[in-house]
Image: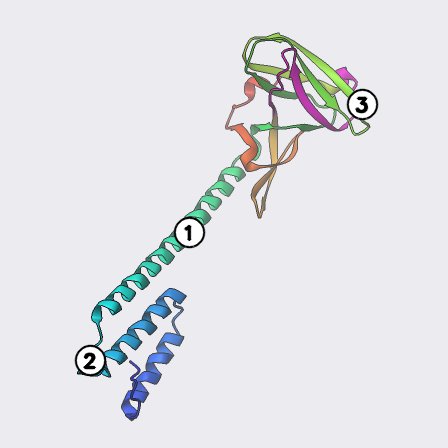
């Protein structure tokens, strides 16, 4: 340990070796600060005026505060490790969905001529429910779904029968009671990409969607929606 009175060559050699060891160890700022504090405390105690001894209570309070800082830093590192673990688990879960059917909350859809399926969840009984699809040209096509009691309303769209050209459409639902229920579309996961915001899934007929937008997934989860 380094001494305040460094006239002794042996003490200087020990101090130099101590510094080399510490330089070779990757310690945190809190740990380094704690070590420096202990060095200063020991040096001050050894060189204090015997007639006016240093109050040890102040040292203990400061050392206790530094120990708390170190504990908080360790907790922060543990939390970061847990976040990394959860992110990896989420990525693995997303990768396992390739080739499976999922439901996604969506406000747009890509039509390529294939049938698409989906679901509305009505909070109130509706005398009539309507889907509105608006293309890039601004033309809106309405699809009547009929009346339905409160609860899940499944639907299927055939673009060819409806005369809808391939392309991207915005989609919304409205009922005669003025309700705008959320639309969930069903599609197969074709690819998973890992981005800075987490896994992004390519879903057939829907496009790229973040993992957290999935509302239902699993083997056969949307089988009742498919024709």
Q: Residue tagged by mark 2?
A: 52
Q: Position of residue 16 (x, y in %)?
A: 35, 84
Figure quadrant of residue 152: top right
Q: Residue tagged by mark 1?
A: 81
Q: Residue tagged by mark 3?
A: 139
Instruction: Magenta stretch: give its range.
Output: 160-185
Which residue is the extreme one toward the front?
A: 52
Which residue is the extreme one toward the right?
A: 137
Figure quadrant of residue 135: top right
Residue at image coords 54%, 11%: 150
Left or right: 153, with 32 as reference point: right
Q: Does the magenta stretch include residue 92?
A: no
- Quick one: label 1 or label 3, which is nearer the N terminus? 1
Left or right: 49, with 80 as reference point: left
Spatial separation of the CA atoms under disc 2 and disc 1: 48 Å
Left or right: 71, with 218 as reference point: left
């Amino acid at each position: 340990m380094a001494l305040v009175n460094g006239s002794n060559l042996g003490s200087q050699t020990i101090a130099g070796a101590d510094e080399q060891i510490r330089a070779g160890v990757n310690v945190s700022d809190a740990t380094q600060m704690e070590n420096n504090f202990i060095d200063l405390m020991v040096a001050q105690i050894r060189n204090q005026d015997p007639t006016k001894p240093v109050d040890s209570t102040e040292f203990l309070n400061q050392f206790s505060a530094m120990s708390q800082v170190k504990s908080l830093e360790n907790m922060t590192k543990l939390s970061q490790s847990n976040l990394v673990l959860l992110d990896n688990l989420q990525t693995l879960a997303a990768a396992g969905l390739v080739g499976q059917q999922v439901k996604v909350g969506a406000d747009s859809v890509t039509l390529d001529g294939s049938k698409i399926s989906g679901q509305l969840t009505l909070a109130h009984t509706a005398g009539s429910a309507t889907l509105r699809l608006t293309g890039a040209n601004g033309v809106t096509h309405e699809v009547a779904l009929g009346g339905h009691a409160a609860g899940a309303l499944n639907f299927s769209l055939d673009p060819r029968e409806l005369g809808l050209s391939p392309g991207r459409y915005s989609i919304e639902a409205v009922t005669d009671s003025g309700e705008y229920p959320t639309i969930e579309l069903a599609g197969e996961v074709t690819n998973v990409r890992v981005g800075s915001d987490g896994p992004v899934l390519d879903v057939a007929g829907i496009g790229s969607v973040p993992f957290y937008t999935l509302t239902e997934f699993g083997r056969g989860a949307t089988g009742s929606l498919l024709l």
